[in-house]
Amino acid sequence: MLLRVSIFWLYLFLASASHGVLDAFTNGGLGVAFFSPFDATRYFFPCHPIEVSPIGAAFFSERGLSVLQSEFVWVWLPSIVFAILAFAIRRLFERSTGLSDRSSNR
């Protein structure tokens, strides 16, 4: 049970931390204050492959579709590949060791 709670909190931490990192890869905005409130400097990474999303009704336009395509290529596709690999590695580990969460007593 403690392991499941720890994994859940790790997941939430990584999701929160990755948001700022992904924002630094966008081509708009003021940059990301990674060290706020200690330092007000805002940062971007050297390459900006992710298009910044339009706000409001402009999201439902041709530019909004372009942003969704950009996010799919640079965010969702790598996330899906990572999830599939993690699932496959977990399955291989369970088969090779004979250990499984489903076989433990709860």
Image: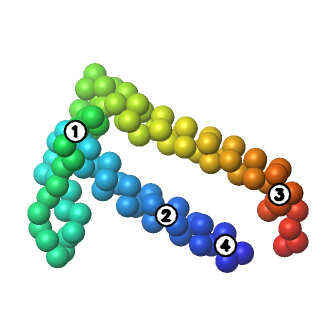
Residue 78: image location, x then y, percent:
47, 38
Q: Nearer the viewer, mark 3 or mark 2?
A: 3
Is tag 3's residue or tag 1's residue first in the polypeptide sequence? 1
User: Which amino acid, by three-letter code, is at mark 1?
Assistant: Cys
Residue 17: image location, x then y, percent:
37, 61
The quadrant in which the N terminus is found is: bottom right
User: Which amino acid, by three-letter code, is at mark 2?
Assistant: Leu
Indicate whether 18 appears above or below 34.
above
The circle on residue 97 is 3
How far is the residue under mark 4 from the one under mark 3? 19 Å
Q: Secondary structure at mark 4?
A: helix
The circle on residue 4 is none
The quadrant in which the C terminus is found is: bottom right
Compared across the picture, whether 30 is left or right of 9 comes to: left
Is tag 3's residue or tag 2's residue first in the polypeptide sequence? 2
How far is the residue under mark 4 from the one under mark 2? 14 Å
| Residue that numbered label 4 is attached to | 3
Compared across the picture, whether 91 is left or right of 14 comes to: right
Mark 4 touching mark 1, by CB under 8 A? no
| Residue that numbered label 2 is attached to | 12
Is tag 4's residue or tag 3's residue first in the polypeptide sequence? 4
Is tag 2's residue or tag 1's residue first in the polypeptide sequence? 2
Q: Nearer the viewer, mark 3 or mark 1?
A: 3
Q: How many marks?
A: 4
| Residue that numbered label 1 is attached to | 47
For label 4, count other residues whose C-alpha is less than 10 Å away and answer few (under 14), some (14-19) or many (20+): few
Is tag 4's residue or tag 1's residue first in the polypeptide sequence? 4
Q: Secondary structure at mark 3?
A: helix
Residue 40: image location, x then y, percent:
11, 67
Indicate whether 86 appears above or below 102.
above
Q: Secondary structure at mark 1?
A: loop
